[in-house]
Image: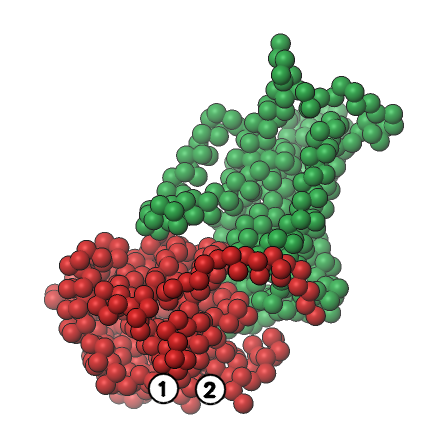
Chain colours: A red, B green
Amino acid sequence: MKYRLGTYAVAAMMAASPVMADLVFPSLSYRTGPYAAGGIPFADGYADYFTLLNERDGGIGGVEARVLECETGYNTEKGVECYESTKGEGALVYQPLSTGITYQLIPKATADDIPIHSMGYGRTSAANGDVFSHVFNYPGNYWHGASGVINYLLEAHNGDLNGKKIALVYHNSAYGKEPIRTLEELAKKHGFELSLLPVDHPGQEQKSQWLQIRREKPDNVVMWGWGVMNQVAIQEAANIRYPMDQFIGVWWSGAQHDVLPAGDAANGYKAITFHAVGSDYPLFDDIKTHVVDKGKAAGAGDQIGTVLYNRGIYAAMLAAEAAKDAQAATGNAEITAGDMRDAMENLNITEERMAGLGMPGFGPSFQVSCENHGGPGLVGVAQWDAGAKTWSLISELSAPDMDVIQPLIAEDSAAFAAENNIEGNCS
Amino acid sequence: MFYREAGDFSSTYAQDQQTFPIKFDRWRYYAVLFIAIVIVPFVVNDYWVNSIFMPFLIYAIAAIGLNILVGYCGQVSLGTGGFMAVGAYACYKLMTAFPDVSMFVHVLLAGVITAGVGVLFGLPSLRIKGFYLAVATLAAQFFLVWLFNRFPWFYNYSASGQINAPERDTFGIIIVGPNTEAWAAYMFCLIFTIASAIVARNMTRGATGRKWMAIRDMDIAAEIIGVNPLKAKLTAFAVSSFFIGISGALFFAIYLGAVEVGEVFGIQKSFLVLFMIIIGGLGSIFGSFAGAAFLVILPVLLKIVGVDWLGWPTDIVAHLLFVIVGALIVIFLIAEPHGIAQLWRVAKEKLRLWPFPH
């Protein structure tokens, strides 16, 4: 039973606010704190893409896109404050770039009918759109990533991981704990031994974890790190002379700023990715002419072409494409968050569409459906070349082990559905 | 002129002992209560409740709790975040184990459990003082966070290690979960805040509070005049932890809805609450409110002025906040160690003589 005490007051306030003549894309960014190194390039990329659309095409379908930036500092409390202060402006989709904040927003945004796109992070089981109606994590999630890592290691060890030792160094938070369940299942399936080494926030103190690695000498070290933790881990690995080519990070532990501080010692470090690397795409010429040369680049403008900047571009691109679809579907240039959600659920990204956007082959082609909000989850592996200071793909995007992942997604989302009395959205 | 004792006669002992002996003060207090209970619930929306009122009310309870321990009893504590986590996890375990019991009961029980944990960690205070006690409570902070991360039983074996508040109601009104109406969450927190403030105020005015203050001012002298330090210190830890536990439970269940212990209840939370009582005023219930209001509203205000009005980059504003809060703490410690509450007291003294100071 609901009592609507403040309804009149709220209605009066909503009536008083002016009609928004733009499409609002809030960016819950973090340019301060121990995770700023990752937050800045992503936020820059996200903002620059919408600036490009406004400058080059006059917005999306003739309506200007507005990026509302709000600093969260990777802190859930501030994330909630940012959500509350931006949702009233007509926010179309939230991309908080933080698993903790995503967990926080899933119930709130669902109740407010605003979609969340947690691209490659957040709650993995949100891939089950039957339960999580407003949460999308295409084109890949953590369990795809975990399986992708193991697939790659299988290949590296000639198809046999039996008796091998694999250590997981992870951020001791919801984010870092996310892959454990999948890795445990995979350990059972392939017979390797998994040891878990948590690193506490913010991750500057890792001496004991690496001492343990030095003692146990695992065949491979997998890392689920973010922010300052990545650089420290790579430096520590170099200090104990752990072979870099046996050290593999998740896609949030594989950017330039993670490996550069360790210098040449980081040569050969690997990281998985769900999109291509490098800035050799026609879109970047447009960004140069329409954004950088006009002095409209976000932030300091020094991140263009880095791994996380490109990911920010990709996130903005998928959001803009969904907004275009929503405009086409409703025949209305000014769409609501509900229209946006419907469009995201029917989003179809093809090779041609990516090429048309100036990013041919950057991401996989996929089709979102009501049941599957998770996309195909193709995982590739990139390797760092410290001499040339570039990342390059050494293993093409390939499919993960869905036989292991799908039951886990079903199990976890069923638990959420039971806890929150959700009946299926798709039937 | 308005603010004076003259003409306000008390004819009973009860009148003589009331919290606000001055009529103007009393009416101001009733006015604040009236606005908070009768007017605010009808005008608030999600933004005001989630960004300002709820954090303010919940931090005020935590600040009252810490003020009892630090301000009244003189036992420095850096374990606030850990004790809030105890309240949050106790509330979570109770909520999921007994879904049909009212949230009021769960929050109160979470406070009781935290009080027990607080007493346990208060035991060293009988032997050690000052900085050394601060370090012992710091150990409690880290131990408790580690504990809730380490043993999956506390978070019901969820994959992410987070606790999520399921939807719960009281008297048919939803107060936990995403479908909560703004006013319901506000009222629920407000009831706890008002009750905490009244209980704390009366405890500190009575025999218990005087014993605490005696221990704070000089423990040997207090012991000689007959204050039992064991009882005084442990009651301070128990009462303080009780309030902090309640605030932790509300923080998790009503305000955030999902909590990750290391991030939400880390050491920075202990410092934040400590800063609140330093800026607000040690040994003052009003100071707890003032400090909580100050540190909750300042960042929001700075953001609105800096980002929304002046259009500054978000990171500059975020950094500016650190500078301002840091500077304020230094300034308060030097210029006004008794905080905003002392400024308020001085203002009241001046008001008594106004407009004819002699």
Percent from the top left, x then y, of residue B148? 55, 61
Q: Which residue is mark 1?
A: A367
SS category of the residue bearing label 1 = strand
On the rendered image, what quadrant is the C terminus of chain B found in?
top right
Q: Residue at x 48, y 57 (%)?
A: A17
Percent from the top left, x then y, of residue A346? 40, 84
SS category of the residue bearing label 2 = loop
**Contact flag, marks 1 and 2 (Cβ < 8 Å):** no
* Residue A356 or residue A150, whichever sits in front: A356
- Mark number, residue B163: none
Q: Badge 2, how many Cα within 10 Å: few under 14, some, many 20+?
A: some
Residue type, label 2: Glu
Q: Which residue is mark 2?
A: A371
Residue furthest out toward the left: A388
Q: Residue at x 67, y 44 (%)?
A: B35
On the rendered image, what quadrant is the N terminus of chain B found in?
top right
Judging from the image, mark 2 belongs to the subunit labelled A
Residue type, label 1: Gln
* Residue A238 or residue B241, whichever sits in front: B241
Percent from the top left, x then y, of residue B341? 59, 31
What is the quadrant of residue A320 in the picture?
A: bottom left
What is the quadrant of residue B211 in the picture?
A: top right
What is the quadrant of residue B339 in the picture?
A: top right
The answer to whether residue A190 of the structure is visible from this angle is no
Judging from the image, mark 1 belongs to the subunit labelled A
Q: Residue at x 55, y 31 (%)?
A: B340
The answer to whether residue A82 of the structure is visible from this angle is yes
Q: Is residue B13 left or right of residue B134?
A: right
* Residue B130 or residue B111, whichever sits in front: B111
